[in-house]
Image (cartoon, rainbow, N blue to C red):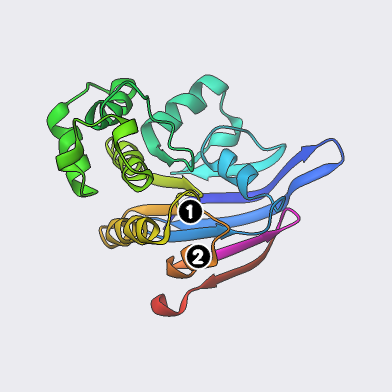
Amino acid sequence: MSLLELRDISKIYGDLHALDKVNLSVDKGEWVAIMGPSGSGKSTMMNIIGCMDKPTSGEVILDGRDIAKESAKNLTAIRRDKIGLIFQQFHLVNYLTAVENVMVSQYYHSVPDEKEALEALDRVGLADRAKHLPSQLSGGEQQRVCIARALINYPQIVLADEPTGNLDEANENMVLDIFKKLHADGTTLIVVTHDPEVGEVAQRTVTLEYGKIVSDRMNEEFQ
């Protein structure tokens, strides 16, 4: 059953068609990598799925609801309640500890709970770093805090934008291992990446060029 559907989605800026009548369906529990060169429309698609932008035309059906028609206020609520976001640049609050950064996400959703935040950090192997500030963490550790923060409210979709873009090979592999575990647990993952290695470990790879989907394939391990 589809959790997310893009139906004839277009995003137009003047003469530029960042997305051009894109159709995409993502089932609950799928791990989809969105790939393509710079300017292909990856970031535009991520922003629309993540309720940070609206399409010029078309429908975005998330859990049976067309979010393309929602107000900015409603989109903020949908993003808060249904989507966990992981960014390349981390966006951690530098004066808060790792566990406090995770609890910030709870604050906007419900009630901060340190025990739950510690459990989320434990899921990404950082229970022993909970009281450290971002400046005391490596890049890989900071990204794992971001993953814990994205998971804390049990979102329907985890949406990651170049999650390994600033990481060395060892930390990239660590983050991908976490994604593999999340996928095995039934989490729906959409990962925007330019890295072929990241794309190959996903269940499915969707490739964009000039605002259109030019390839949509299941990867060998999952066929």
Residue at 48% across / 25% down in the picture?
76
Q: Is residue 165 above or below residue 133?
A: below
Residue 19: give x, y in percent of width and height: 72, 48
Residue 175 magenta = no
Q: Which mark is residue 199?
A: 2
Left or right placement of residue 37 versus residue 175 in this view: right
Q: Amino acid at mark 1?
A: Val
Rate crowding at label 1 as few (under 14), some (14 to 19) or many (20 or more) other CA atoms within 10 Å. many
Q: Which mark is residue 167?
A: none
Q: Is residue 102 above or below residue 212?
A: above
Give the residues drawn in magenta, as a range. Answer: 205-212
Q: Kindly identify which residue carries mark 1.
A: 191
Residue 73: give x, y in percent of width and height: 51, 19
Q: How many numbered markers are drawn?
A: 2
Q: Nearer the viewer, residue 156 or 190?
A: 190
Left or right placement of residue 194 versus residue 97 in this view: right
